[in-house]
């Protein structure tokens, strides 16, 4: 059965976070509330996730949460920027 939504198949959401980061947890709760599917990667417990994040940032670590939405990197829980990137990539499910 074909998926006829406008979602881009290659647009994904990845949240790089730590266990102690309150803003990371708040962002993930917000994404859950919106119904956005995302991958959460703990940069302290997962060396590969840490290396991946540093590669995306050109080695210039700036803090967590850092979110990759379809290739756009957003540092911090910047709700307007996150919302704009989610909308641009059609990643917010439509209400039934």
Image: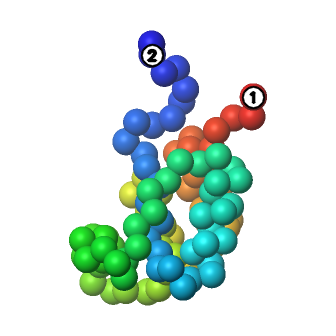
Whether residue 20 is visible: yes
Q: How is the image coloured?
A: rainbow
Which residue position holds label 2? 2
Residue density around tag 2, few if under 14, some if 14–19, many if 20 or more, within 10 Å: few
Q: Nearer the viewer, residue 27 or 47?
A: 47
Q: CA distance from mark 2 to mark 1?
A: 18 Å
Horizontal and vertical percent position of residue 76: 56, 78
Residue contact between numbered discs 2 and 1, judged by CB atoms under 8 Å: no
Whether residue 72 is visible: no
Residue that extends furthest to the right in the rendered view of this protein: 96
Horizontal and vertical percent position of residue 90: 57, 41
Q: Nearer the viewer, residue 73 or 31?
A: 31
Which residue position holds label 1? 96
Residue density around tag 1, few if under 14, some if 14–19, many if 20 or more, within 10 Å: few
Q: What residue is drawn where x is 69% and y is 50%?
A: 34
Q: Which quadrant would the C terminus be assigned to in this image?
A: top right
Quarter location, residue 82: bottom right
Is 56 placed above or below 84 here?
Answer: below
Name the side, left or right, on which 37 lies relative to 81. left
Is 77 placed above or below 39 here?
Answer: below
Name the side, left or right, on which 28 lies relative to 60. right
Q: What residue is drawn where x is 50% and y is 79%?
A: 19
Horizontal and vertical percent position of residue 64: 49, 80
Q: What residue is drawn where x is 45% and y is 13%?
A: 1
Horizontal and vertical percent position of residue 56: 31, 71
**Among numbered discs 2 and 1, the one appearing first in the sequence:** 2
């Amino acid at each position: 059965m074909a998926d006829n939504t406008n979602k881009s198949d290659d647009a994904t959401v990845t949240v790089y976070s730590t266990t102690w980061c309150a803003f990371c947890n708040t962002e993930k709760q917000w994404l859950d509330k919106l119904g956005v599917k995302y991958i959460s990667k703990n940069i302290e417990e997962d060396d590969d996730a840490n290396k991946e994040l540093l590669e995306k940032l050109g080695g210039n670590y700036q803090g967590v949460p850092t979110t990759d939405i379809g290739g756009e990197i957003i540092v911090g829980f910047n709700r307007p920027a996150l919302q704009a990137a989610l909308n641009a990539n059609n990643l917010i499910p439509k209400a039934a």
